[in-house]
Amino acid sequence: MFFRENNPNFIASFDFYKIELISFCIMEDLKKYFLGQFDLYQIDGNLFSEERQINFDKLKIDSREKEVLVSVLKEKNATLDEVKIITKGLRESLKEHNLNYYERGVTKIPDYDYDVLYKILKNLEELINETVPTSITQRIGFNPLKDKGKSKKKYETSTKYFQTFDHLFKMYSLDNSYSKEDIDDWELKNQKNLGLTNIEFVCELKYDGASISLQYVNGELFQALTRGDGNSGEDVTENIKTINSIPKKLIGDFPSSFFVRGEIVLPLSGFAKINQERLEAGEQVYMNPRNTASGTLKLKNPLEAAKRPLEFLIYSVIMDRSINVYFDNHFESLEKAKKWGFNVPYQSKLCKSSNEVMEFINYWNTERHDLPYETDGVVVKVNNLHFQDELGFTAKSPRWAIAYKFKAEQVSTKLNSISYQVGRTGAITPVANLKPVQLAGTTVKRASLHNADQIEKLDIRVGDEVFVEKGGEIIPKIIGVDFSKRSLDLLPTKYITHCPECHTELVRNAGEANHYCPNFYGCPPQIIGRIQHYISRKAMDIEGLGGETVALLFKNGLVHNYADLYELKVEDILHLERMAKKSAENLVNGVQKSIEIPFESVLFALGIRFVGETVAKKLAKHYKNITALSQASLMELILVDEIGERIARSVIEFFENEENQKIIERLKSYGVQFEIVEKINPNATEKFIGKTFVVSGVFAQFSRDELKKTIEDNGGKVGSSISAKTDFVVAGDNMGPAKLEKANKLNIPILSEEDFITKLNESE
Ligand SMILES: [Zn+2]
């Protein structure tokens, strides 16, 4: 091993902000190396061009690359821990570049540099023998050599892209229309072109999501391509497979090869949930469901994508109809697709005339607000597929379809005042107080102004007539000012410099959009917010205590932090407004009961900035108790999987604070859980060690999970399917006949529930 011994002082003084810088230094060295050997660089540039022999060259380059990397690290006299930190830092930094590219639409690094950094990361991971499942180097199912059929276009050498393939049938965009006249004109044109007067149409809602084209071969999902530029799109099959409403295997009588197209949408509830979680973790919220949906499709890690509740709504079935005729019209094709297992929106409707089309449009123009997804219009299609063929396409769009765009949900109203809210983390949110106005079926009085930059950019002034829009956001937002109505005496908005609640001077960290009130322990809304977070359902889940009561308790001087809750007595709170004896008792009991809440939830409840539910779970699992966590160094924290520098610094800061230390000591004294309690089962034995069981059917004395747990508690393993490695099958009622047959074939003993219990009770 070439690493020198650990030097604790050096590690302590290691500047974490320089991680990427160091990586870039290594990269510069590597670049010099490559550029000095021009031939090799050229080959590298064409690494995946065609021929196999070049791949051998690639192997050579990779090993030399590693040599250089090692020599650079040697020169820098790096220890193993330092290399681990560099590796981790680089992993985070590349993840960030990916996020920038796919979710925020910005590129902060040239492609070539990205590729080199990626290679360095891969090499470093190999060097220190570290595989991290969430690393971008561990993308699942990505195999550049796998042939995806004849439509293969090119393989990008850049690891930043998904593979691109041509669409066998071009993905056109639609012409837009905005009025009844537009629709009438379009109908007339079609009548003329076809020489007919009676044309049937299909109306469908136009969902606001990411268009996708799915190819099915022999009833199985073969490939998913994004719309791209219409001619070719990116292969996002692995991410698409994580969406439940996309059938992986079809049912019934389907063509051997065909395409379906539709929209990948994020339901508004799912969008709100994702943003709620980001808010709780103190992160920036996403702007709208559509961008979040298309960003999700391009996440490098399908496991991440699987966490987003995306849905697929189909809008067309495409196949070569010269080979087989499965339907004659569009409406029928949707009906068929439904039978094969696709999610066809129920709203689609067959219409006999442009008048019926307008009825559909007018109906959904108001009803759309109750839909679970965002929709921005209606698509009208000529139903008969022969007519569609006859009408054909322009260069840009089909003549047989047109989109009707709903009017943007936008109104203008007067901005009465701007108020500033202080969140539990101290973040300041400017809120517009508006003259009440009707928008999208609700009365709007307030709207989001996001932050100081936004106000300045739009030059929003109190007294202005402003445009308000409602999209997928939780509260409506102001998108601009009607300058034609601005009176001359309005003054530019001066953003507040001091906290509206505690009058502390605000701070704004470099690179952050929001201002913060730094008076963490003295600012009332922060204190109340923290206690409200502490008692919330996903945290300590305290029954009998709500957010308003917390504010009331604080205002009456009864609580100053969440530890004070445990000191509350019934007689203290009886005199509060709306507090009866029963509810006071419930409150005190609820607080006492919260000492049973497990450590991971307690850790989340503490409200450490950037420590959301998932991070809290990770930390709890890793450190097992609060003492170990509070003593962890920055470096140790960063080495925990998925814990980045930002989170690590926040955790350190939290535990360094004496006030927090006192609060935690007090919580401990009340009995709150600060360690993971390993459940010790007194019945556990090792009698099943080395044995694999498969459990099938329904049982009388156990639930299936209980049965599995019993096997594991006694040292056995539970397999998911019967194979030669299975030792026993435990069969309940209704065991599948296929399983039974397989077990018999492999001569595996089958235990009834009674047999199993007998076996369990046998002495060892
Ligand atoms: Zn304040």
Image: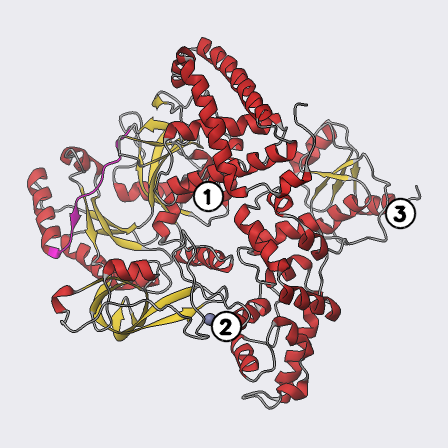
What residue did someone put label 1 on? 243
What amino acid does circle 1 point to? Ile
Q: CA distance from mark 1 to mark 2?
A: 44 Å
How many other residues sit within 10 Å of disc 1, few (<14), some (14-19) or many (≥20)?
Answer: some
Q: CA distance from mark 1 to mark 3?
A: 44 Å
What amino acid does circle 2 point to? Cys
Q: Is residue 577 above or below residue 726?
A: below
Residue 254 shown in magenta: no
How many other residues sit within 10 Å of disc 3, few (<14), some (14-19) or many (≥20)?
Answer: few
Q: Nearer the viewer, residue 631 or 572?
A: 631
Q: Residue at x 69, y 32 (%)?
A: 741
Secondary structure at numbered mark 1: loop
Q: In which quadrant is the C terminus drawn?
A: top right
Residue 223 is left or right of residue 201, and the answer is: right
Q: Which mark is residue 140?
A: none
Predominant secondary structure in magenta? loop
Label 3 beta carbon less than 8 Å to ligand 1: no
Tag in front: 3 or 2: 2
Reading the chain from its start, which is encountered first: label 1 or label 3?
1
What residue did someone put label 3 on? 761
Label 2 beta carbon less than 8 Å to ligand 1: yes
What residue did someone put label 2 on? 523
x, y (%) of residue 745?
A: 72, 27
Reading the chain from its start, which is encountered first: label 1 or label 2?
1
Q: Residue at x 74, y 42 (%)?
A: 731
Q: Are marks 1 and 2 in contact (CB under 8 Å)?
A: no
Secondary structure at numbered mark 3: helix
Residue 33: in sight, yes or no?
yes
The magenta span reads: 169-180
Q: Is residue 335 above or below residue 286?
A: above
